[in-house]
Image (cartoon, rainbow, N blue to C red):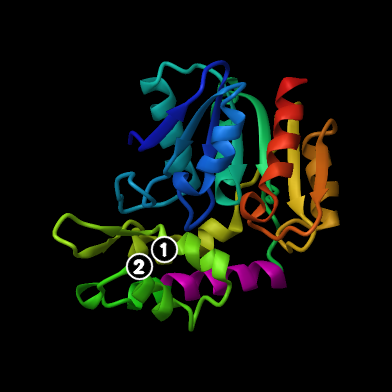
Amino acid sequence: MLLHHTAIGQGQPVVILHGLLGCADNWLPIAQKISNSFRIICTDLRNHGRSPHAPTHTYADMANDVAETLDALNIERTHILGHSMGGQVAAMLWQMQPQRIDRLVLADIAPLIPPSTAADAHLNNHQQTLLALQALNLSQLRSFAQADALLATTITNTRLRQSMLKNLARERNGQFSHRLNIDVLLQYLPEIIQGVSSNNLPAHTLLLRGEYSNYVSDNDIIRTRKLCPTLTEHKLPNAGHWLHVDCPQLVVEHTLAFLRT
């Protein structure tokens, strides 16, 4: 599968992989700032954004999609910035084709977080968000403002809800459609939340985590250092799981400093 992508800037390539229920558009403000120094490729992963829908959604599927897209772009080796599910996709690509990745930035995720209360909560939260999107009566929907009001009863976080609205597309006839393949994502949600089992990570790996996020614990950092003894890690103040929304400038600064060394 060739993934829909937006490419900006010049220089060494950096591929940005969004998280579950995200899309390339969420990362364009970050991409634009990094593109002063690098060639940025913002991708929509399968069953998300403007990329094709498919009947499966495994990490092997997604890693192969990224590899095929890199081949189509004549990119043999790249830096990758992966947020949440996108970071797990990068970890899977490293297991399958390590020669493709130079430096890796993991945004608020660590490979194979063991099942925990937090993981159960993540599964439930994503399931509720998908069901809320699925429950929208698209044939009766007249505006994004109306969709926002309908989702507000389930998705109370305003910034998260605004991001979720990017998963709705307005067609030329005025009708709305889902960019997410909701049925398939619901089917594969437990596997997505489980994550990727990794034996190691690139020697040059940066892990950014939010101060208020429960996606990466101190114990996860200890386990990740066993996969990458040279791991660089930063906890970003006043940030939750959506680092690129809560503190975009810090994400840019840490990422640029890491990629330039």
- Report which quarter residue 257 is drawn in: top right
Q: Residue at x 53, y 57 (%)?
A: 192
Quick check: can you spot residue 188?
A: yes
* Chain part drawn in magenta: 117-130
Q: Position of residue 196 (x, y in %)?
A: 61, 47
Closer to the camera in the image, 197 or 4:
4
For disc 1, the neighbor class at 10 Å (few under 14, some 14 to 19, many from 20) is some
Q: Secondary structure at mark 2?
A: helix
Q: Position of residue 260 (x, y in %)?
A: 73, 21
Asked whether, in this view, residue 197 is left or right of residue 217, the answer is: left
- Residue 206 belongs to magenta span: no
Image: 67 above or below 246: above
Tell me whether circle 1 and circle 2 mark residues in contact (CB < 8 Å).
yes
Q: Secondary structure at mark 1?
A: helix
Asked whether, in this view, residue 99 is left or right of residue 150, the answer is: right
Q: Position of residue 24 (x, y in %)?
A: 46, 44
Quarter the C terminus occupies: top right
The amino acid at mark 2 is Phe
Q: Nearer the viewer, mark 1 or mark 2?
A: 2
- Residue 129 belongs to magenta span: yes
Q: Residue at x 74, y 45 (%)?
A: 208
Q: Position of residue 98 (x, y in %)?
A: 60, 25
Q: Which residue is mark 2?
A: 144
Q: Which residue is mark 1?
A: 165
For disc 2, the neighbor class at 10 Å (few under 14, some 14 to 19, many from 20) is some
**Which secondary structure type mostly characterizes the magenta part of the structure?**
helix
Q: Residue furthest bottom?
A: 153
The amino acid at mark 1 is Leu
